[in-house]
Every structure is written in C-alpha cells, then in structure tokens.
Image (cartoon, helix red, strand yellow):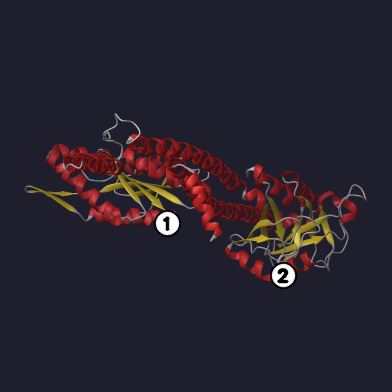
Amino acid sequence: MQKRLSLVALADRLTLRQQTAAMAGLLCIIVVAVSATGAAWLARRDAVREANSELVALARTMSDRLDQNMFERYREIKNLASMEPLRVVWQDNPARARAVLMQLQASLSDYAWLGIAEPNGNVRAATRGMLEGVSVAQRPWFISGLAGPAVEDVHDAKLLDGLLRKSPDDAPFRFVDVAMPVFGPTGAKVGVLGAHLSWNWTGNLRDNVLRNHDPALASELWIIGRDGSVLLGPKDAKPFDSAQIAAARHGISFVDGSGEQPMLTALAATKGLDDYPGLGWVVAARRPVDVALAPANRLTAVIALLGLAVAAIGAALAWFLAGTVTRPLRNLCRSVDLIGRDPGAAGIRRQHGSRDILQLSAALRSLLRRLGTAEKGARDAAAIIRDVQAKADKQARDAEEKTRRLGSDLHTLQILADTDPLTSLLNRRAFLPFAEDAMNYYKRYKRNLGVLMFDIDHFKRINDTFGHAAGDEVIRAVAKIIAGQIRTTDKVARFGGEEFVVLLRETDAQGAENLANRIRESVGATVVTQGLAQIDLTISVGAAIVGQQDRDIEDVIERADKALYAAKSSGRNRVVLAETGREPAPATV
C-alpha cells in the first residue's frame, strides 16, 4: 500500500508531458532491447552455421588434395613399374635402373627414396645408391608390393633415418610407402619397385591450402590416422574418438572444448581416388570459437549502439511530441483558472489540437454559458473532423491503389524485358545472371554444370523457301521441344536468330550428351506444317562441361559455341562435346 501511494505521489508531481515522454522512452528501450537480442541471436546462429560450412569445406578441400596427391604418386609408380622398355633395365642393368629412379626423384622432391628390390628382398638399385645390397624382405611395403600394388600408411623410417637426417637434432623421418611388383621381358616377376614419400609433403600441402584460405580466420588443419591418432598437428593434441572418426565420412562439425579454448571443429575423411584405395585419413579443420563468432559479436555491438541511438532519438521525439499534444490542455487549464479571478474572463476560448481537447473545451464552454450553442458547435466540429478523416481515408486508398498498379506495371515490364517475344523463353540478358550464379556455385562447391548450344540447320534456306512466318513457326517449335526436355533446375534461352542455349546444373559430360541427343532426335522427328508445305527439321548441338581452366561462364559458353561450329562443319544434325583442354571432337550421332 505504501509503495502504491509513493507511485501516486510521484505521478502527481510529474506533468502529463513528462509522463508521456517517460513512457514513450521506456517503450523505445524495450523495443530496441528485444530487437537487438533477437538480431544478436540470429547473427550468432548464422555465424555458427556459416563457420561450420566454411570449416567443412576447408576440411574437404584438404582431404581431396590429399587423395589427389597420393593418387598421382600411386599412378606414377604404377606407370613406371609397367613400362615395357624398362623391363630389361629392372632385371639386368642396376646402373640404368638407378638413373631412371634418380630422374624421377629429381622431378619431385617428395620422393625421399626410390628403389628396386629383388624377389628375395635385396635392394638391387636405389636413388643415390642408398640401401643397395641391403635386405628389405621384412619391410611391410616389400611384402605387400610383392603380392600386388600397395600403399602403406605413415611410419617412422627404420633403415633410411640415419642416411637421410643431416643432423641428429633433426626430427625423425616418416614415410608413406607406395610399392608395385615389376616384371622382366618374359613376364616373370623380378622384384618390387618401392617409393618412400617424405611425410613433409603433407605439411607443405596444408600450408598451401591455408594460404588460399582467409588468414584472418586463424584456421588449423590436422591429419588424423584411421586409429584416431594425430599424424599432422600438435604433438600434445587430444585424439578424436572412434564415433567422431566414423562420422567424418559424411563430414561433421562440432565444438571441441577439451583444450584451453573452445574450438569449432570440422572432420572430413579421405576416400581414395580411382584405383588408389586411400589410407583412411581424416582431416580436422579447427578454428577458435571466439574467432568464428567475431562477426556476430561485432554485429551485436553495432546493433546495441544503434539501438541506444534510436532510443535516445525516440525519447527526444517523444518529449517534443508530448509537448505539442499537451499544449492545448495547458492552455485550457489556464483559461479555466482565470474564470472567477479575472472579471474580463467571461468565457473560454475553444482549444484545438486533439478531439479530446476540443470536446473538453466545448463542454466547459457549455457549462459556463448555459446555452446549447456550445453543444451544436461540438457536433459541427465533430462533423468537420469526420469529413476530414473521410477525405484522408479516400486519399490513402487512392494512393494505395496507384502504388499497387505501379508495382503490377513494373512486374509486367520486367517480364517483357527478360522474355523473348517469339518463344516466351529467357533472352540473353536475363539468361546470363542465372549462368553466372551457377558458375559461382561451381567455384565454391565444385558442383558440375554444362552448357548446350543449339542451332537450327539450314534455317536461312527455310526462310528463303517458305517465308519468315514459316521460320518463326520453326523457331517456336524447336523452343517448345527444348523447354519440354530440360529439368526445372535448368535454364533455356534464345540467344538470337535460330540459336538457343541451355544451362545444365548437376550434370556430367555423359548426361549432357544424352540430353542433347534426345532433343536432337525429338527435333528430327518433328514436321512443321506451313500451308501445304511440310518442313523437316534437324539441329546441331555443341556441348561443354565446366572445367578448372574456365575463368567464367563466358569461357564455357565459348567452348560450347566452338563445339557447335564443329558440329555444323562436320555435317550437321549431330552433337559435339567440347573436351576440356582440347579441341572439340564429334560425338557419335
């Protein structure tokens, strides 16, 4: 009760203007606080989601690069072991075998040691002569390589450590082994070709991947063995458990709180490539949580500062508006106070500013004059207000209708600007933004895309023979066939004249070629009737799949256009697929 009386006493001491300004300011602060809290939560959620996505992509990039490098080494050793001219060298000429191995080692420093071991395990020839005459019969790489192509996981150097280390203080050598059986001229197995890849190449690869990543994000990359141990990373790093390693096959992310500071961590497993089986490595991409959430924290601070500024402006505006709203009431209070004090104050002037003030002043005038004219004036004033309100409402409805019509007209104009009037397909200007967006998606996520270029064969002859109306009907028929064959995720446009282009998402060369042939066959089975004339149609198609050498979507379109030219030049009514890095070659009709 005492608290309630204190609040009433405080309200009695404050003017209506002060109370209104205080309430409006408090409302501004509450609204800003709720908005800022919601925005901060959304920003943090999006920042975590974006950071997770980036880290998973980084881990997958590293795992793909590991697979690619190991596949290339595996393929080099396999190709070297199977070369026909070297079969005599492996069996009869250690000096020439050593020269071949030295040449391969000189081309790539990752090969710490290359050697040929005889079936009994003795090293017959090796780079720099190291271990020649020494038995490696008990080494896992030799045992596996004698049985067939093999890759051995990371291990410490046993026989070569003392030969390769320049100083006893240097870190021990670790290798990844690739081994292949080799055969003599008669086809008999004459030994094993072994290659020891220095484990240092993974550190160089990691540094290269991180250099291409944003250095400000302070990311780390570890390589984890199939048993969960850290192969590349801090020596005191905590191993990951088997469940996390198993989930890495599909790519996972989580917060690791086992260290000094929480780390956002993503895991991605290597999978091998072609005939290279892979070694079950897992890449861990890590980033401090406070670094990952720094953009969200900065955005939260900005939102808070803006909120405070908005609240201050709102309070000031509320103070000004409250003064404007309550001024007629203050004037009315002063006029009433003069009644009985000032002999000349026989009445009250009508006060304006709000409907309530107007009604209050009218009621007081009625009481003072004891006449009904004040009531009539109030009714007249109310009628005026209603009329003004009705006019204002009509003006608002008219403005809304004009805005709606303008929006509809703009939408119609946009459709007209983006659409080819003859075929109702996209035009070139509207098609290119879709194509550029697909190219950006490919560069970021490596998701395939392709381009098909179509050209109606002998179109000029059709125009000259049957007239332009027939040519327009042919163009519409081909456009309808192409649009009916593609998926909803693909885009088709008329590039001008009798030429069409299709953007294919999530496809490979075989899929693009199959689709192009289906469309070509559908067009070939179509006959356009113009009057009494029956017009047979064929089309030529050029196809291109995006490749690493393509700088932008224009490069892909240009390669598809060159393939189209090759199709036209080689007899028409066919599909030509542009091969990456080479001139286009005709596909089978």
Quarter of the figure that contains the C terminus: bottom left
Cα–Cα span, label 2 and label 1: 36 Å
Give the amino acid type for the residue marked by disc 2 in the picture.
Answer: Ala
The answer to whether 113 appears left or right of 567 in the picture is right
Which type of secondary structure does the marked residue at label 1 adopt?
Answer: helix
Give the amino acid type for the residue marked by disc 1 in the picture.
Answer: Gln
Residue at (29%, 31%) from the top-left corner? 345
- How would you rate the neighbour count of disc 1 (Cα within 10 Å): few for under 14, some for 14-19, many for 20 or more? few
Question: Closer to the N terminus: mark 2 or mark 1?
Answer: 2
> In the rendered picture of this protein, how many numbered marks are placed on residues?
2
Q: Position of residue 407 (x, y in %)?
A: 26, 41
Q: Position of residue 545 (x, y in %)?
A: 44, 48
Q: Position of residue 52 (x, y in %)?
A: 59, 55
Closer to us: mark 2 or mark 1?
Answer: 1
Residue 248 shows up from this direction? yes
Q: Which residue in the structure is indicated by mark 2?
A: 147
Q: Which residue in the structure is indicated by mark 1?
A: 510
Front-most of 500 and 520?
A: 500
As drawn, which residue projects farthest toward the left?
A: 532
The answer to whether 204 appears left or right of 297 in the picture is right
Work out whether 249 lies above or below 288.
below
Q: Position of residue 353 (x, y in %)?
A: 31, 37
Front-most of 413 and 160?
A: 413
